[in-house]
Image (cartoon, helix red, strand yellow):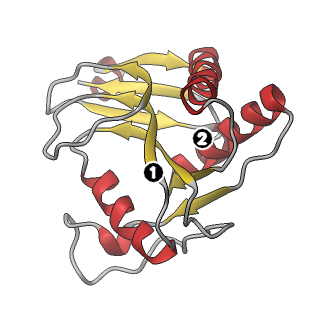
Amino acid sequence: MPASQQNEVVIFNASDIERSLKRLAHELIEHNQGIEDIVLLGIVTRGKPLAERVAKLLQALEGKTVPVGYLDITLYRDDTSQTFKPASESYVPVELTGKKVVLVDDVLYSGRSVRAALDALNGYGRPAGVQLLVLLDRGHRELPIRADYVGKNIPTAKQERVNVQLQEVDGLDQVILRK
């Protein structure tokens, strides 16, 4: 076995991801007393398919569709050079003023991606509130940001890497911890 694979551990498999998303959908419904005025916005890249999955679960549970969009935060990041091309464009399906926006992402780490997503939201109206749903929270925050809905807390060392793989992007569902 190559040395790189010896330091990899699957910490979340496909059924773990599915179970967590179902629980998160239930928590979101309970916290908001339904899904009225909810808009899901996935943070590109893996937040987008996660938001779509949560929307399907909400529809199955509540019998109503929830608008789903995505935010490309590339231009709002503070940790990249200024000579890059955005990965994609954002898509916001409805006016956000007065809506309850739920940002969806795969991993919450430093909080900088969430800060960038909040900056990106400014051009789309003034939501009644913004909530954060993440599959994994690995700690090590650099900004005072916390998730409202967390699939699983994964305590990690700063030098460790968490690699979320999703069927829609990577061809399989799993989370790998690289030490």
Query: Is 159 rendered above or below residue 99?
Result: above
* Residue 16 rendering spot, x and y as whole percentages: 57, 15
Q: Are marks 2 and 1 in contact (CB under 8 Å)?
A: no
* Residue 131 rendering spot, x and y as whole percentages: 44, 43
Which amino acid type corresponds to the residue marked 2 in the rendered image?
Leu
Identify which residue, 45 or 91, lies in the foreground: 91
State the separation of the CA atoms marked 2 and 1. 20 Å
Query: Is 134 rendered above or below residue 67?
Result: above
**Rendered residue at 13%/44% (across/down):** 142
Residue 9, image quadrant = top left
Question: Between tags 2 and 1, which lies in front?
Answer: 1
* Residue 144 rendering spot, x and y as whole percentages: 17, 43
Which amino acid type corresponds to the residue marked 1 in the rendered image?
Gly
How many discs mark residues in the rendered view?
Answer: 2
| Mark drawn on residue 8 | none
**Rendered residue at 45%/51% (across/down):** 129
**Rendered residue at 49%/18% (across/down):** 12
Along the horizontal axis of the image, is 125 left or right of 137? right
Query: Is 124 rendered above or below residue 158?
Result: below
- Name the N-terminal-most of marks 2 and 1: 2
Q: Which residue is mark 1?
A: 129
| Mark drawn on residue 50 | 2
Circle 2 packing at 10 Å, graded few (<14), some (14-19), many (20+), is many
Query: Is 53 rendered above or below residue 70?
Result: above
Residue 152, image quadrant = top left
Along the horizontal axis of the image, is 147 left or right of 95? left
Along the horizontal axis of the image, is 60 left or right of 66? right
Identify which residue, 10 or 108, lies in the foreground: 108
Q: Quadrant of the C terminus?
A: top left
* Residue 122 rendering spot, x and y as whole percentages: 40, 72
Identify which residue, 154 or 85, lies in the foreground: 154
